[in-house]
Image (tube, grey):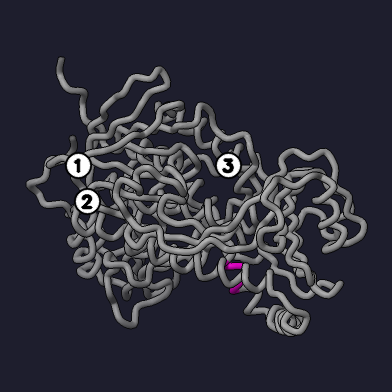
Amino acid sequence: MAAPAKIDVMISGAGPVGLTLAAELARYGLAVRVVDKAAQRTDKSKALVVWSRTVEHLDRLGCGDAFVAAGLQVPGISIFGGGKRIGHFDFTGVKSPHPYALIVPQCDTERLLEEHLATRGVTVERGAEFLRFRETADGVESVFRRADGAEETVASRWLVGCDGAHSPVRHQLALEFKGDTLQSDWILGDIHLEGVQCPGQVELYWHADGVLALFPIKGSRYRMIADLPGGSHAADPTLDEVQAVLVRRGPATLRASSPIWLASFRINERKVSDYRVGRVFLAGDAAHIHSPAGGQGMNTGMQDACNLAWKLALVARGAGAEGPLLASYSPERSGVGDQILAVTSTATAAATLRGATAQFIRNHAAALIMGIPWVREKAATIATELAVSYPHSPLNARHPGGPTPAAGERAPVRAGEAPVSSGPDPRFVAFGAEGAGFAAAAGRFPRLLDPVLRPPFSPGGLWLVRPDGYVLLAAKEGAWDEMEAALAAIDAPKSRSPSL
């Protein structure tokens, strides 16, 4: 019997990260398979927040509208301490078509992504346990056990482990998952709640006992999260225990009822140093896990997928050079992972600070700092992940003294303008004034450069934007030679086969 045809990408794990990666790759026409050990997708709310930058990526993917329709748009976060509100972060002013935190329970996120993936002709293979892999001269052979107990070997050009904190792919790579487990215990409750102070917003209470966070989900349904002294709560909480924490740390008006999900957990902060080993990549929790403070985890993983997908697609199509493109994934996303770990760790430490004197100083300092408009604006930009950037990316075309946004920064998303590279081709898009040089560049790099020149972000500048919406080159108007040089550095060798 003939060996099965080699696919482009094998994906282990069908959570939000694996589904996002599969959908992006399928949009670009790559052959993918997605396996997951679980017999069905999660029915728990788990990760709740889809931040502005992630929704922008979902717009590019083609399912942003479905997420917005399914979610709750939360305009801000209020922080309380010492019995009064000491700070407020307003998302409505961030420069995005989606100036809000979009609340979508993870069970719905997975459903929406799986439904979208099905429109691309890809079905998640559930009840299929990933067992092992072997790198070959030109790809990877992966073995998984199907739901019927039979083992199957799949040949692919690349393997991506999106299989969570206990990733079998990462374990076989023998990569150290460096970090710590925080010693405090945490409880969460997906409950119905009455008596909140700021309906429809996130409420954060800094109390002498610890922190209490309330996230609206839909109607009276809320998520509560609170920390408890280390080792004090290994079992899942009862509704009475949740209620006791609510009224002690929050307003006395809070009343919890009709619990949907009650759980306890501990926070791990861990990360691998390299997201790639040969033809095998890691994304999402397989590569990095951190505090749930700020709701950054799932979003960071989904953005890992968006970063990797266009690079794999260009290489698979023979349009992009494998060396520079695939080598850029780990330094770009590992750098973001380091930043997210630092931010969430600091936020967790501040919220769980112990000692009356330290808490008094924290509350007064926070009130002063959060009273400064530019601080609030910066914090909102960081929280919504619009501040994610790749200033040190090896792909960046260096142009000292160029305009802003600079190379590595997020390109502005302008109202009424189609997202960059939202079609079936992963193309770079130029933003600048009309000139003969653009037509010449488009003719020289037809597989890399979108044939439509868009208006500049500001007069006198020329920008080349990557398929994932980040600036590759920021130069002066008319610097067509620099744009061609930037594309030439990524262009595939002419001798390369255009496809599998």
According to the image, label 1 marks what residue?
135
Q: Which residue lies under the disc numbered 2?
A: 278
The residue shown at (44%, 67%) is 338
Which is more toward the observer, 402 or 318? 318
Q: In the rendered structure, which segment of residues is drawn in magenta?
A: 378-382
Does the CB distance between marks 3 and 1 fall below 8 Å? no
Image quadrant of residue 440? bottom left
Read off the residue under disc 3. 65
Question: Crowdedness of circle 3 by 10 Å Cα count: few (<14), some, many (20+)?
Answer: few
Identified by mark 1, the residue type is Glu
Does residue 361 appear to the left or right of 159 in the view shown? right
Residue 14 shows in the view:
yes
Quadrant of the image for the C terminus?
top left
The residue depicted at 69 percent of the width and 68 percent of the height is 89
Q: Check the image and name the residue furthest to the right.
A: 253
Q: Residues within 10 Å of mark 1 (few under 14, many from 20)?
A: some
Q: Distance between the Cα atoms at labels 3 and 2?
A: 36 Å
Q: Label 2 neighbourhood size at 10 Å, few (<14), some (14-19), many (20+)?
A: few
Q: Earlier in the sequence, mark 1 or mark 2?
A: 1
Q: Is residue 379 magenta?
A: yes
